Every structure is written in C-alpha cells, then in structure tokens.
Image (cartoon, grey):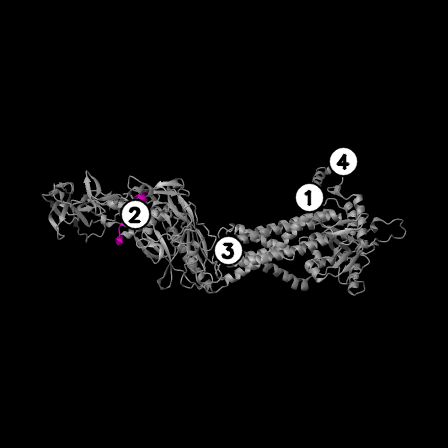
Amino acid sequence: GTMLKTLPITLAWLLLFLSCALAVDTKIVNLPFWTNEEYTVPCYGLYSDSSKYICSACPADQIVDVSTLGGDGNYAGCTCQPGFVNVLNDCSADATGLCSGKSCISCLAAGNASYTDGTGCVRCGPSTIGLSGSDCACPSGQVLVEKTVGGGYAAEKSCTACGAGSAVVTSNRFIAGKYYFMDLYGCQRCPDPKMSMSNTGGAYSCACSSGFTLVGVSGIGEQSCLQTSITALHRNDVAAASQVTYYGAAEGTITSQTFQHYYLSAVSRCRFAGTAEDVIYCQQLANLCVLQLYDRASIACRDHLAIVAARSNQLYNSVNNWVTGMPWLYINGEANTVCNTWAYKKRVTLNALLMRFVLAKYHMNGTFGGYENLDTQLSYCQRDEPFTDRGGGNSRSTEWLQFGSNKKFSFSCALRNLLKEEMMFYELFLYGRNADFTPVPIRITNVLNAENIRPNNPVPTEPLCDTGDVLTRRFFLYDTLSGISSINSDNTANIEVIRYASDISLELSLVTNKFARIYAPVLTITYEESKPAEWKTNPVSTALIHFSTAYTMNMTAFFANFRIFFIIIMVCTGLLFALRYRHWQARNSRVITSAVLTTDLGGFNMSTLTEMALIATNTWNLVFFPVTVCIAWYAFTFFKLQTAPSVLLPPENNVYSPQSPYYLFVVNLHVMFFFQLWYVLMMVYRQCKADLFFIDWEPVPTKPKGEAHASTHNQVSVWRTILVANEWTELQCTRKTDIRFTLFFLGFVLLGMNEEYNATQQPALEDKSFDHRNIFLRFANTTFYWLLFSYGQYAWRFFLKERFFGEPPERLFVDFCTIAKISVIVLDEKYHGYYLHCRSPHQYADGTMTELVSMLHKEEAGLTVDRSLDGAPADVQTFQIFMSGEWRTAFDKIRNNLVGAESVAEVMNDNRNRALSRAAAKSGAASAMRGGPNGRGQSPSGLNNLPSEKVLKAWKEMLVFLQEFVENNFGQAALRRTVREPTYWEKLTNGGPELSVPEQPSVFYTDRDYNYCKVWFLGRELELLTLNILAYSLFDLWFGYTTTSILLTYLLDLGVCYLRQELGREMISRKTLIDNRFLI
C-alpha cells in the first residue's frame, strides 16, 4: 500500500529531472593537454608550467632559474638575466593573477653588472677588462670574484689568478672523464690530485705530474694518475687484458673500453699498494675477472690468482684463495665435496620457516654497496606498459623463500631497460643464528676450464653440484659494461654486446643422516647475450628469463635400495613370464593320432615368438604398473604429509636426460603405455578373429498330417539366432566402468576443485598454489582418482546394482540365449575356448507369449529338468573348454569349407568389395529392376555376397558336429568330452589340463565366474583401465594440460572401441553367416 501511495510522487520527480536534463546546453571543452611527444621532450630555454602541463617562455629580461629543477627534469621558475636585479612588486591590491610579483631592473645602462643572485648592481673593478655582455670579464686563466673573504659582497668585482693545476671552466664539458659545469666564479681541479688542468685556446686537458702515468678512458669514468713505477709491470698487458670473448649469440671478441679504463689501475694498485683504500682496486680487478666469467686464461683472472698466490701465507678464515686485502672469488677443492660439506648451522622446519638470504653488493669501481636482504632481486628485469604483468620486478612471488617451497616460473625481460640501470656485482650468503653468514657457492654454466670445456652442466647429475664443477662466489645479473667497444663523439658509450642471466636456479639439499639440517645452497646461473644494434629491427627486444628453486635431498641411498628392489622385481617378472608361457604352451600343444602321428607342440615360429613377446610385454605391465603406482603413492604420501623435513624430491629438470632422477620413471611410463597399447590392439584382433558359432537346439516342427512334404513354414526360424548375434554384437564393447563418467569427474575434481595442484612440489597437501606440478606427483595424484572413480563404479555395480536392481550383463546374456534355446561356442585360441550351454528344458522356443510365460512358470515351479549340461553341476551353464588335437582336426576340416578369410586384412578387403558392389548396385538400380544386359534381374544391393550352397552345407555339417560333441555322442574317445572342476591353482594361474597325450577327450572346466566375458571388453576391464590410465598419464607428461589429456584419452578409447565394434561385426557376419546388415 505504501509503495502505491508514493508512486505518483516518484513519477513527478522523474519527469522534472528529465525536463531539466533536456534543457541543459551541454558543451565539450577541449583542454590544451600535452601530447605524448611534448611531455617527453625537455623544455629547452623554457620553464615548465605544471598548472597548464606546458612549456612556457619566461617574461622579458628573465631566464629560467636553474635552482628550480623539477621532477620532470625541467626548470619550474624564472629569474632575472645577468646584468639585471630583482625588484619585488606590491600585488596586494590585485587578486586577478595578472600582477607580476617581480620586475627586473637593468644595471647595464649605468655601465654596471649585477651580483649573481640579482640582489644589486656592482661595478667592474680595475683588475677586470670591463663589462663584456652582461657581466664583468677577466683576462684568460683568471677567475671573477664578487665576494670578500668573509663571505659578504664586495663593492666591486675583481679578477684573480687560479692556483697551480686549476682553471676556470667557461662552458659545460667532460674533462678527464669528469663532467664540469661552467663556473666563472670558481677555479676547478682535475679528478686526480696528481693532475694539472690546462686551457689552451678553449681546449681543456688534465696532465699527470712527473713520475705518474695517466690511466683510464674518459668516456667510461674519471681518469687517474698512477706512479709509473707500479704500472710498468702490467702496462703492456692492457691491450690483451681488454679482449673480451663471447661464446653465445654475440660470438666473437671485442676490445672492451671498460677493461681499458679499469685494468691497469686495478692490477697496479692491488698488487703494489697496501693502504686500506687500495682494497677498492682489488675489488675492481675481481669484478673484471667476473666479467671474464672466471676464465683463468684471461689476463684479469690470471693476475687475480697471481696476487692471491703471492699472499697465500695471509689466509683469511683459513680459506684457500681468500687472502688479506683480496676478495674471495674461486672456491677451492672438489666441488662435490664442498657442496656436501658446507652446512647451515640452523635447523630447518616446514612451519613457514623463511630462509633469509643476504646480498653483498659491489659497484664496478670496487666500492662496497652494503648488504640487503634477498627477495625479488633475482627477478631483475621488467617489461614496459602495457605488459608489466609479464615482467619481473618487486611484484614477483617470494614464496620460494619458505623452506620446502619449490617454485618455477618465467618472466619476460625488456633488454632495453637494462641499459638504464647501474650494473652491480653480488655475493650471496645464507643468514643464520648468531649473525652467521654461510657463503653460497655459485655455479655459472658458461665458465670454461683450462681445457676450454664447460664443466658446469646446467643441471647437475648429483644434488647441488657435480665433482668437476667450478664453484665461485661473485656474480652479476646483467652486464652492460664489458661490451662497450667504443666511445661516441658525445662521450657516450657504444654498447656492442650485453649479457643477462637467462636461467637462475637456487637449490637446497638436506644433510644426509642429519635430521632437519641442510647444506649450503647453490645458485646456478646461465648467461645469454644480445646485440643492441639488432634491436633496431626488433623494437621490443625481449628475452624470457627462467627462475626456479629446488629443495631436495641426496637420493643415492634410495637408488641403491631401488636397484636391489628392481632386481627382485625383474626376477619375479621373469618367473611369472615363464609360468604364463608354460601354461600357454600347454594349452596350445597337442599330439594328434591319425594315419601318421602328428605333433603340434607349438615350436619356435613367428606365431610363437609373437606370443612370447605379447606375454612378456603384458607380464611387464602386470608387475611394473602396480609397482610404479605404489612407489608414486609412497613418495606422494611421505612428501605431502610430512611434518618435519625428511623426504624431499629431486628437482625436475630435463626429465628426458639419462642423468635425470626421473628418467627411469619417464622411460618406464612410455614403455608401459606402448606395451599396453600393443597388447590391447592384439587383444582386439584376437577377439575379432575368434571362432564363433551359435548352436540352435530348436527341434524341427513335425510335418502336419495330409502333407506329402514339410513346407518352409515348418522349418526352424533363424530370427532367434539373429537376435542372439545382435546381443553379442552389442555386448562386445560393454565395460564394467564408464570412461565418460570417470573422465568427467576426473576433470571436475582436478580442475573444478583444483586437486591437480596437489602435485605441486610443496611438502604440504593443503598448499594448492598455482605452480609447476611435479610429474611423479602428478602420476600419483591422477592414478589415485582414476582408481577411485573406476573401482567406485565397479563397487556400485557389484555390491548394489547387480544385487538389488538387476543382474550382470554376462548372466543376462546366458539367460537370454537359454530362452532362445541357442548355445554359444567361441574359440579364442586354437585349442581353447568357451561354451555357453543354453539348451533350455522346454520343448521348443518358438511360440506365443502365453506359451513362453507358461514355460517360465513351470521352470520356476521346478516342474522341468535343470538347464545344466549332462555330467556337469546343476547350477553351471558356462564352461571353459580345452580341445583335444583330434577334435581340432575334425573341426578345422569342416571350418575350412565354412570360413573364407582368416585375417583382419582380408575381412577389410571384403568390406571394400562389398562397398563397391553396393555403389555399383545403386548406380544401376533402375536397370536392375528392369533386367540387366543379359536379360536377367540383378540381386538387390549387397546380396551378391550371400553364402553359397557349399558354405550352407558346411554350416549345417558344423551344427550337427557341435551338437553331437556337446551331447557326447561320438564314439571316438578323442572326440568326446568330460566335465570337471578347475583347481584353485589352475584358476589362479589360468592353467589347463594336460592333453599332450593322444586319444584324450576334450575337457570342460566349469566357469562359475563367467570368464567367457574375456572375449568381450566386459572381461578385459583391467587391461582397458590400465591402458586408459597410462594413456592419460603419458598425455599429461607430454602436454601438461588436464583438459588436453582427458580429451586425448577419450579419443583413444573411442578409437579402440570403434575398431572392436566394426571388426567384431564383420567377423560375426563371416563366422555365423548372418549378413552384417542384420547386426545393428
């Protein structure tokens, strides 16, 4: 009610608002904002007006005030020109903003100059040469003075001579590597006290005093003077020391101006001087050696090592190669021993312990830049907008500092940005309790040894480092100095090559046999090169930088135990193979009694060798698949659920390398998949090749009275056989689990619930951060869910569905065949197969619905005999059969007349022939109906492949033969049968009876477990599920995407099922003489 009352008022206000809005005359105001080009260009001669975002000209008689430098690099105010004085105006009565608060009054009209701050006029004294322009002038080499000794302004300006070695700089310029600003009121000196500045005709220079030598390159930095006596030893080495060789993308050698600038002073002052400040020059020499990537053949590194050797009796901290006054560059000793000896004194935990790393920084000139905590410095390079999210920088993750947190990420680097940054050198330490600094060894993979070989592999074969590695201490992230090949005319450097760290890896390892202790971490760096000159054709000039951390442990003991375990498993695999092959050979070996004694012992031929290979590959998977799964689950459980650091996985680098700890797993995964794929394809081939026959027990209807001959309506109907064949066809690809259900929920759990990130290499199951997933943990994680969903479906079917809501399809098929009164015999091997005894106790199967129901009621009431085979238990209708050699000979004699093509290739050829005949029939359908060229009507499409009279006769003969065999009517012992129960050992090993002695009857084993399903997919669930899991795992290894792996796994399963369905349909048609058009 309230809402209805307020509605008119609301509408009135709305109409008023719209009328006001329409009445407003809207205008667009264009503001004079800078364009992109304007704000990037300095305001030369103008001042920056921040209120208007433009460059403006100063008023008359004023110039820009150099003391008002703004944040944009421009001057923000104006002041009076030289020769003018500042006069303040009273603007208190003018609030328009048009009143100028300052005026400039000229002193020049009275022949005077002004003080430099514009506070007053002053005359030029007699020592000057008078007024020149807007100020007093001095003779050459003299400085202008306007203040007294006490700091006050003098009554007149005067000139005085500069002291020895100094001079007046009359314009901005570089002198001896130092930039000087114009200053007519001061005498300026050269950058080195031993230099004297001179000005000859406007050309300034600095010269060293006698006994000193000028060193350095003006375009790199300030030049200096060294005693000639200490430079003599190395003066001739400058040219060779300046040669820098690159081995990457910028392969070649250049003469580095940086080395020419620093080398002679660094090595001379470091070798011969002993003052505290001379340590800086030893740092310079060390930096030059680092720029040479520790090449011992380079002059800088050679001199560094020579100085260290000369001071070997002054070791610091008892560390080799670390002597007084010299930085520690090379780590002595066998690398593997060093990496497994240096230990971090503090215990580590998994309770969010942050590892504290400290960087010691050094500038190129050797000065110490102090310490700083390591966080995002290794993500050193950024991208410009709009791609800043792709680059490094302060926003990069530092989760890797938490102990056990393995991280792996990449970021994009705009190399052009490195030219704007100062290059720094670093030494890395791990900070511990009591302010202990544990040195972190550095592995640079570009380092060359004395044999000109790179000993440091990008990925060490052992934890932390290998035996032959070269370990060092100092490193850089990018090098923009060694590649300076020349100095341009404007005194800027021409950088020909830059180097940058393209791959950075930090590895930490648990101490063997010591709880919660770690060795000193190892930082591995790989450098790459780029030429700035090539960026002109590639303006983006980006590079991809990789960073990773690995918390690991020594796996030597594990692999030693694994070798023993592997040998045991291989022995078990060999024994199982021998047992399975022995049983196969027993099933397929017979001695046949005939006119000539024939022996079929399955000797070594191509078929036997194929079978041996098939058994071997399947046995391998039967053993190694569950073993691999169990090992993966073991690693997953103990790694993910540990509370203290005891199990750490090795880093995942280049898993296809034989040196990788994951290599055996990767190889085994490939082997198992292709073994299983071959086994399944051979299984499909054999299932489709199996001999299949339907035995119709329906009696022939009796001839009605009064008829001389039985009509065709009194023959046995074939439709029951067609129905059974269709049911068989439909059950060919039926499985106990639905792969679509499994894959759907696998994707739901892994993607929807982020369970795929259980496989990240973080030792905490609750940590599901989006990060790289370890391949071994991925296998453990996905196989768990595969088996959970698959065996969950199996449990649902076995314990609930087939017990309370229905029956198994294999049992329903037997019931269906029994009602149809059609038995089934299928031979999957030459002397082995299955028999489904489906001869119902009823007199006939063809009848009305009333008759069918009546017969079922009688059977339910126990008014009929049981369904079982004569001589067999009453509750068994399915049998596993082992044929005698004589029976197989008699069977093949009839079969050869019944079945044509044996191989799948021949069947496919028949399919093509049928397709061609159908196409021909369709094209000539009209003439076929009218009669062909020969005056005879052609058969409808596809009927030209109907069985011949000879084949039909053979089919009837086969039917009688099988009926007589089942009823045990043959007189010859070898053609008879016997029924028995298999032993538990025979069930376990799939063994059979010994039939190698001739004249033995065939044996029917009771098949209470419906093993006949093995001729369908229904009885091969384990083989197919193994293929599905291995396919998904391999696709996941190859592509790393869950969705891709799910799709490819489903397509592979679809292809296998399609192959089984199509080939099976063709084989059923061929073996049972039922045209495939009836097989729906």
Is residue 473 at least partly visible in the picture?
Answer: yes
Q: Which amino acid does label 1 sit on?
A: Ala
Q: Which residue is the site of mark 3? A: 774
Instruction: State which tag comes first along the sequence, 1 or 4.
Output: 1
Q: Which residue lies furthest to the front in this view?
A: 313
Q: Label for residue 53?
A: none
Which span of residues is magenta-colored? 256-277
Q: Which residue is the site of mark 2? A: 267
- Do tag 1 and tag 2 residues touch (Cβ < 8 Å)? no
- In percent of width and height, residue 385 lies at 39, 48
Instruction: State which tag comes first along the sequence, 4 or 3.
Output: 3
- In percent of width and height, residue 675 lies at 61, 51
Q: Which residue lies furthest to the left in this view?
A: 126
- In percent of width and height, residue 127 lies at 10, 43
The alpha-carbon separation of the residues under discs 1 and 2 comes to: 82 Å
Q: Label for residue 905?
A: 1
The alpha-carbon separation of the residues under discs 1 and 4 comes to: 33 Å
Main SS of residues in magenta: helix
The alpha-carbon separation of the residues under discs 4 and 3 comes to: 71 Å
Instruction: State which tag comes first along the sequence, 3 or 1.
Output: 3
Image quadrant of residue 1001? bottom right
Q: Helix, strand, or loop for circle 4?
A: loop
Q: How many marks?
A: 4
The alpha-carbon separation of the residues under discs 3 and 1 comes to: 43 Å
Q: Which amino acid does label 3 sit on?
A: Asn
